[in-house]
Amino acid sequence: MEPTLYFHPLASYCWKALIALYDSGVAFTPRLVDLGKADDRAALQALWPPARFPVLHDAAQGRVLPESTILIEYLAERHPGAAALLPTDARERLDVRLWDRVCDDHLQDPMQKIVGDRLRDAAVRDPHGVAEARTALQRAYPLFEQQLAGRTWLASDGFSLADCAALPALFYASILEPIPDGLGALHAYFERLLLRPAVQRVLEEARPWFRFFPFADAMPARFVATEPL
Ligand SMILES: N[C@@H](CCC(=O)N[C@@H](CS)C(=O)NCC(=O)O)C(=O)O
């Protein structure tokens, strides 16, 4: 029996898992979770009480895998198609895990702060926290530019966990805080990521939902939703 992925097509951490699954050709059953629906939330919560996704339920193995990085590590250990996402060479593997963390901690987290704040009632917004998050994004981009000099992928010779993490982080972060024009290696890397078939599939599946993104107005025209739900 193939595993089930609990996810939402707009959620950036779910994209990270979906890119890994599509890129490695691992068969799975998608289970779209609308956290606004009590039944959906309860189903996710029954597996993982924090009710954050993605969550992979591999019933055949009796395993529940929350946390996108661990989920991808699990795939890499069990599925030959996914093995390359986590290189076996210890040094390269450490770099991959480092840059996975940098993507989550220095791009995804500040990006979530800014988006989350927009969804709050005006009375409880946190302008100072949002300003700090924007500064964090501005400081992160040059780190990536430096790391990408002379590289095709972020942290290893091949496409890896770090690249699965980078695409959703850069996609959403760059809508909120554009990547400066001068960071040529980072721009080129982002375009390379966008061409990856797994990424194109994720974007295609997300497109009908983009209008629900709180900063949809700031999305580049090439990504904007064209079809109604
Ligand atoms: N560290 C977790 C973060 C997961 C996460 O924050 N997921 C978001 C969607 S991108 C979520 O579940 N948001 C729903 C909520 O906060 O209620 C991971 O890597 O999977």
Image: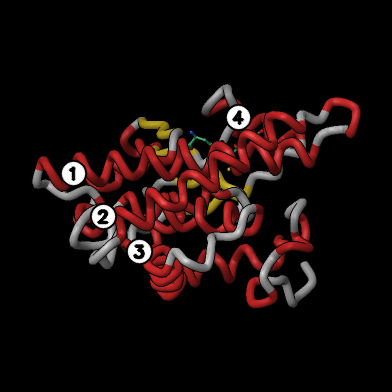
Pair 3/1: label in front: 1
Closer to us: 10 or 166: 166
Q: What amino acid type should be assigned to the residue bearing mark 2?
A: Ala
Residue 200 at x, y percent in the picture: 49, 72
- Distance from disc 1 to disc 4, alpha carbons, whole Å, reads 29 Å
N-terminal of the pair, mark 4 or mark 2, is 4
Q: Residues within 10 Å of mark 1 (few under 14, many from 20)?
A: some
- Distance from disc 4 to disc 3, alpha carbons, whole Å, reads 26 Å
* Helix, strand or loop at mark 1: helix
Does the Cβ of the disc 4 residue fall within 8 Å of ligand 1? yes
Image quadrant assignment for residue 187: bottom left
* Helix, strand or loop at mark 4: loop
* Helix, strand or loop at mark 3: helix
Q: Is residue 198 visible?
A: no
The residue indicated by pointer 4 is: 51
The residue indicated by pointer 1 is: 93
Residue 28 vs 132, above or below: the answer is below
N-terminal of the pair, mark 1 or mark 4, is 4
Q: What amino acid type should be assigned to the residue bearing mark 1?
A: Arg
Q: Residues within 10 Å of mark 2 (few under 14, many from 20)?
A: many
Closer to us: 132 or 96: 132
Q: Is residue 102 visible?
A: yes
Q: What amino acid type should be assigned to the residue bearing mark 4?
A: Ala
* Helix, strand or loop at mark 2: helix
Pair 1/2: label in front: 1
N-terminal of the pair, mark 2 or mark 3, is 3
Residue that appears at 46% across and 36% down: 105
Question: In the orientation shown, which residue stands out farthest toward the left?
Answer: 89
The residue indicated by pointer 3 is: 23
Of the 4 image quadrants, the one containing the C terminus is bottom right
